[in-house]
Amino acid sequence: MKNRVQELRKQRRLSQSELADAVEVTRQTIISLENGKYNASLMLAHKIARYFDLTIEEVFLFEEDE
Amino acid sequence: MLVKVLSHALASGVDYEKTLKARRNLSVLGIVLGLVVLVIVNLWKPEADLAFADFLKGVYTGTGIGLMLFSALFWVKVRKLLKDPELQKKTRIQEQDERQTLIAMKTSSSALLILIGLEYFALLLSGMFNATVFFTLLAVLIAVLVVMIGCKLYYSRRI
């Protein structure tokens, strides 16, 4: 699943550590999310979307065949 | 309760502090248990014909000392976490991180399956040489499978 986490983080000039602290995960999780290696749980997706003041669908791009 | 204390099934900062306090108490128990093991080992007088008795005594002594040392160090670590909210938060995040939890689950699951396979192979091989080893491995294999089925039933109802 693709996401805009890196794009949104850079827009707000945040480091991966700062974002990780804000949503209470490790920096490695943010790295894996941004690389597309890891899919966030619903809870984490909600936290990240809320942090960026967006909806989940605006941050995480669901594809039809998923 | 013990499973929750030792595992990562935690909901919030308040829960985590309670868990840390429970872990601190458990570590005291660990020190006491280590001491008990050492006392028992020192009082144990093995049978004269028991092979490798000295080696066994060494293993049990090591277990007792290891348990005491590990529990003492753990107690110090938990005490440090309880005194430092920032460090506590950082540790809580590390423990509760969902990716780390997923990695731990997959690791346990894969390791268990691989070990069952290796154990079965050892079981088949041992049958050609030693009946005691064969039946010991068989008993362990059956015990592992029973525990696996039990855990599956438990979590199927719980989740």
Image: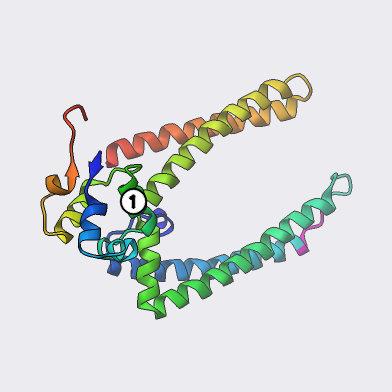
Boundaries of the magenta span:
B42-46
User: Subunit of mark 1?
Assistant: B
Please give the residue where the numbered disc 1 appears in the rendered image.
B98
**Is B97 on the left or on the right of A66, as rendered?**
right
Height in image: B125 above or below B54? above
Which x, y percent locates residue B54? 84, 54
Q: What's the amino acid at mark 1?
A: Glu
Q: Residue at x 27, y 53 (%)?
A: A6
Height in image: A22 above or below B105? below
SS class, disc 1: helix
Which x, y percent locates residue B143? 54, 33
**Is B108 on the left or on the right of B154, as rendered?**
right
Residue B61, quarter of picture: bottom right
Q: Residue at x 72, y 56 (%)?
A: B60
* Quadrant of the frame with the C terminus of chain B: top left
Q: Residue at x 32, y 54 (%)?
A: A30
